[in-house]
Image: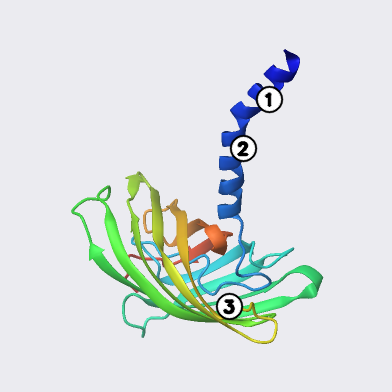
Amino acid sequence: MLRTLVPQRMARYTRPLACLRLLVAIATPTSAAAQLAPDSPRLISPHGSSGLGVHWVRSDALPGSEGALLATWAPAPLPDGLRFRTAMGRGAAGSSAVLGGVDLQVPLRRGGSLRSLAIDWQSGAGISFGDYTILTIPVGLTGGVSWTSGSVWLAPWASAGFAADMRLGGAAPAEEFVVTPAFEVGADLALDVERRFVFRTAVALGERQAVSLGLAYGLGRLAR
């Protein structure tokens, strides 16, 4: 009887274990090994992505990463919705990577109140150099809301889209051109009415996994 019960009990866990293995496989990055993705995290919010921002980034795309320093900057002469990005990081065995690029966002929807949903279209172009070279064109949508209580301002947001990567160099993966989905969630927090300084955090999911913490000055709402 014991021999009969054991297989029956084990069978109950077969399907849940299979689902767990599938989720782990989906969440594990596979295509950006030993290189920083130029667009991850994108850090594009419909409630402000301009000004000057400095962010610490930990990316699963750079194995054993010690972290990367990412700067985003939208100088006044640029048209609204454009900004530059640049980053440098070092990973396992001393391998390093640098990146640069430009971000673009265009408002699609603005409500009449702070709590109404705002939506932007986003794109851009980026390049990163490390063990190999990645040329990236990201496209997607970002949406968010905001709340104000006294001098405190909070604006959570989320984005979804895809990134087209061209991977070049002797150490690049065999598949030169790939298109991968890109998902990201984040939040901005200001503790002064003028929002001169904004704390920013974001988490990129999927194959372009990364987490960031940063501080932005003059974030604004697509205004410089």
Question: What's the amino acid at mark 1?
Answer: Pro
Do tag 2 and tag 1 residues touch (Cβ < 8 Å)?
no
Q: CA distance from mark 2 to mark 1?
A: 15 Å
Image coordinates for residue 86, horizontal then vertical, percent: 55, 78
Q: Which residue is mark 3?
A: 175
Q: Secondary structure at mark 1?
A: helix
Q: CA distance from mark 3 to mark 2?
A: 31 Å
The residue that appears at 46% across and 58% down in the rendered structure is 184
| Camera-side residue of 28 and 98 | 28
- Residue 68 vertical position relative to residue 212 in the rendered view, above or below: below
Check the picture and name the quadrant holding the N terminus: top right
**Position of 166 compared to 116: left or right?**
right
Image coordinates for residue 145, horizontal then vertical, percent: 32, 51
Image coordinates for residue 217, horizontal then vertical, percent: 46, 67
Do tag 1 and tag 3 residues touch (Cβ < 8 Å)?
no
Q: CA distance from mark 1 to mark 3?
A: 43 Å
- In the picture as drawn, the residue positioned furthest to the top comes out as 1
Check the picture and name the quadrant holding the C terminus: bottom left
- Residue 164 vertical position relative to residue 193 in the rendered view, above or below: below
Q: Which residue is mark 2?
A: 17
- In the picture as drawn, the residue positioned furthest to the right comes out as 93
Question: What's the amino acid at mark 3?
Answer: Glu
Do tag 3 and tag 2 residues touch (Cβ < 8 Å)?
no
Q: Earlier in the sequence, mark 2 or mark 1?
A: 1
Task: In the rendered structure, find residue 7 and report the number of the disc placed on it.
Answer: 1
Q: Residues within 10 Å of mark 1 (few under 14, many from 20)?
A: few
Colouring mode (rainbow / by chain / secondary structure / one colour): rainbow
- Residue 190 vertical position relative to residue 80 in the rendered view, above or below: above
Q: Secondary structure at mark 2?
A: helix
Question: What's the amino acid at mark 2?
Answer: Leu
| Camera-side residue of 26 and 41 | 26
